[in-house]
Each structure stands twice: as structure tokens, then as C-alpha cells.
Amino acid sequence: MKALNPITTAVVAAGLAICGSAQADLTANATATSNYIWRGLTQTENEAAIQGGLDYSHESGFYIGTWASNVNYGAGDPYSYEHDIYFGWSGTAGEVDWDVGYLYYNYDSAANFDFGEVYASLGYAGFSLKAMVLTNTEADEVGNQDFGFGKAMYISGDYSFTTGNEIELGAHVGWHDGDFAEAFNGVDGSYFDYNVYIAKNGFKFMISDTDADGPAAGGAFDNAKPKFVISYTVDIDLLN
């Protein structure tokens, strides 16, 4: 597993030093899912995935977390895992929730495709809007590709609510664009993804689809057709 870039490591260390030993939460999570869907696209050739993460949050609003999953992008590819680390600050302003941060995606060394994004989101009354923008990548550009800062982005909107019997219902729509998005995902040009889901007590059933074209839309990926995903997540409070 590759080390994080120096800037990421320095910022994380500084954030933890600022937090000190004040009031904080430490939680873990584990998920079993029939398919790992990321921005509407399967990351496991429509096979199952086992995932898990660890999150630390401080009363100041600072948080840091890490998350991992198995991945598979086809026979002979160099990918076996995805390991993410993220940190940021979140809070509320009146009735509006806000969140800003940085997310680093780490893959097998042979893949040479690690990348990072900055993100910002706003939420109000069950609605949320989020933007994620490419900041850096170790991937090499080919031809006229541009993997520079801000040259790829993902914008999404979500809505969810909980019924009287604690069933959560939600809907999502997202738009992915940029040369890096095409190179990493194997799609032609920008695309939309959308899903609806129902969840309760860790169980979740989701129907997801995209309008993607290109290599990732067919074959074993089959991202141009609806996908039905069942998952179960366990959350663990490590301080209680």
C-alpha cells in the first residue's frame, strides 16, 4: 500500500494535533454489498464487495476517516483494493448543514492511478448538494488529456427522509465530467447517474442506473443498464 502524499500527511497530523484530547467520537463500520457502485458505475464487475472504515470526529467540527474495499476492473488489471483517507470540517449555520474536506483515493502501486479531490456540500431539510473537484493525481496524461486541478468534477444532489416506522427513502442524481473521469472510468464524455433506495437498520436496497457510453457501459461492467444492489452495514461506537 502506498504512502499518502506529503501535503495530505502534514494536514492530517496538524488537524489531530489541534484536536488534542478534547471531546471526540471514534466509530467503525463494516459493509457487505452485492455490488460496489461508485458514481453509478460498478467497481467490482458487478460482483460482491466487503468494505470497512474508521472515523474520528471532534467537537470543533474537524473529522478524519479511512475506508477500504476490494475492487476489480477486469481480467489482468492491476487493481485489487481501494483505500481512501479523508478529512475536513463540518458544522451548521442556522438550519443549513455544511461540510468541506479533502479525499485521497489510494490503489495498488502497479495501477499508478491514485488521485485526490476537494469537496464541499450544503444540506437543508433532507436535501443536499455536493461538488467534488479533482486536485491531484499520479496518473499520466495521454494525448490531449488534462488532469490538472479543477479539470474533472462530480456534482450531485440527494434527497432522503425517514418514515414513521424508521424506514429511510432516498433519491440521488449525479453528473461526472472531465478528461480524468473518462480515463479512470472508461466512459466517453460526461454522464449522469441516478438511484433510489430504501433502508432500515443497516439493510439497504438500491436501484441505480446511468446514461454512460464507452467501454465501461458494456461487457462485464454493463453500466448502461439498471443495477439492483443489496447491502448490510454495521456501525460500531468504539468509545462506548
Image (cartoon, rainbow, N blue to C red):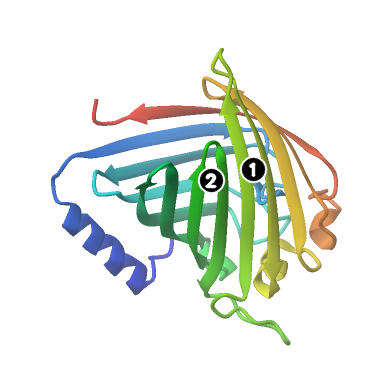
Using residue 28 as the reference point, say whether residue 69 is left or right of it.
right
Q: Which residue lies furthest to the left in this view?
A: 21
User: Which percent across, then down, holds residue 87?
Assistant: 37, 56
Q: Is residue 11 above or below residue 144?
A: above
* Residue type, label 2: Ser
The foreground one among 185 and 92 is: 92
Task: State the separation of the CA atoms marked 1 and 2.
Answer: 8 Å
Q: Residue 77 carries which label?
A: none
* Residue type, label 1: Tyr
User: Which percent across, then down, holds residue 130?
Assistant: 56, 54
User: Which percent across, then down, holds residue 238?
Assistant: 28, 31
Residue drawn at 71 percent across, 35 percent down:
196
Q: Can residue 238 be seen in this view?
A: yes
Residue drawn at 57 percent across, 69 percent down:
113
Q: Residue 36 carries which label?
A: 1
Residue drawn at 71 percent across, 49 percent down:
40
Using residue 122 as the reference point, say whether residue 27 is left or right of it.
left
Q: In the rendered image, which residue does mark 2 sit on?
A: 69
Using residue 96 as the reference point, say whether residue 91 is left or right of it.
left
Q: Residue furthest bottom?
A: 143
Q: How crowded is mark 1: few (under 14 residues within 10 Å), some or many (20 or more)?
A: many
**Are the two marked residues, 1 and 2, in contact with CB atoms closer than 8 angstroms?**
yes
